[in-house]
Amino acid sequence: MIFRTVNYTISSKHIPPELDKFKIIHLSDLHGALYGRDNEMLVQKIRQIRPQTIFMTGDMADSSPHAIPRFKNLCSQLCGDYPVYYVLGNHEQELKKDILSKLMTNLKKMGVIILENEWKTISYQGAFIKLYGLVTPMKYYKDILNEYQWGVKFSAEDAKKLLGRSDDSCYKILLAHNPLYYPAYRDWGADLTLSGHIHGGIIKIPKLGGLLSPDLTLFPKYDGGHFKEQGKDLIVSRGLGNHFLARILNPPELGSITLRSRKAL
């Protein structure tokens, strides 16, 4: 199955005019998928879009045999041309500690900027926004076979404990693999949240949306696409790969996000 490019436009009065038409590529949930030799089809499309930066929202690698080499190869091709920012998903967190440590070391040597409950300033043409990366503890993932604790919910206060207080003086983008807790991210202060994890609901039911989330919830609210709540935005990638079941009416997604400053319109 070939991926499709999905274009999103995010408009806000808090986006500096200097960042008007700033382009972001959003990659998520690669899971060892391959699009042409060495992912050449994916890389070629990214270069055609000519983004200013690339954000990756987790599960780019997992424990399957080819996932880590293919992810590293993709990063090696992209890091020479673009700033690449990356936050871990649950599948990276589930890797053996020595394997994960080696992967992180290799990625950092390539130039990948890994955000583990921290933030970086993204400066462009004299203006800036802040990019935060949230690594949610595994107990918050609804997987009864692992560390999930029943009745535990992730709150805005939990986000504050991990990320610190949000900076209300500037536009803030949050990378958070799991969109289940989007209200907490929104209430913490994220203007735009980018997530993945849900794989578009695996099977898309016309007029109803994605059928199934990885935790086996039926018709998850944030299955894929652009959601707007209380004046803030969430984009959930449908992901590039797959980990269970087969996609139906739900092609893999390469996300292209264009920021628009209302001050520049």
Image (spheres, rainbow, N blue to C red):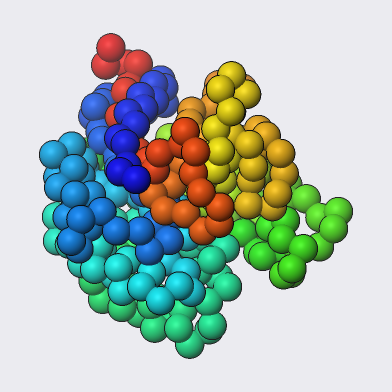
Q: Is residue 91 above or below residue 178?
A: below
Quick one: quadrant of the N terminus? top left
Q: Nearer the viewer, residue 215 or 159?
A: 215
Write down the quadrant of residue 136 in the picture: bottom right
Residue 37 or residue 103, whichever sits in front: 37
135 or 167, nearer to the observer:
135
Q: From the top left corner, tell me how far across and down residue 110 is, in percent.
A: 23, 71
Q: Residue at image x 36%, y 73%?
A: 66
Question: Which residue sits at x=26%, y=47%?
Answer: 53
Residue 45 coordinates in the image, percent (x, y): 18, 43
**Which residue is at 59% across, 19% downward?**
207
Residue 174 x, y percent position in the rendering: 49, 45
Quadrant in the rendering for residue 19: top left
Which residue is painted at 38% across and 64% down in the image?
32
User: Is 172 left, or right, of 78 in this rendering?
Assistant: right
Q: Quadrant of the C terminus?
A: top left
Q: From this view, report whether residue 32 is shown above or below residue 189.
A: below
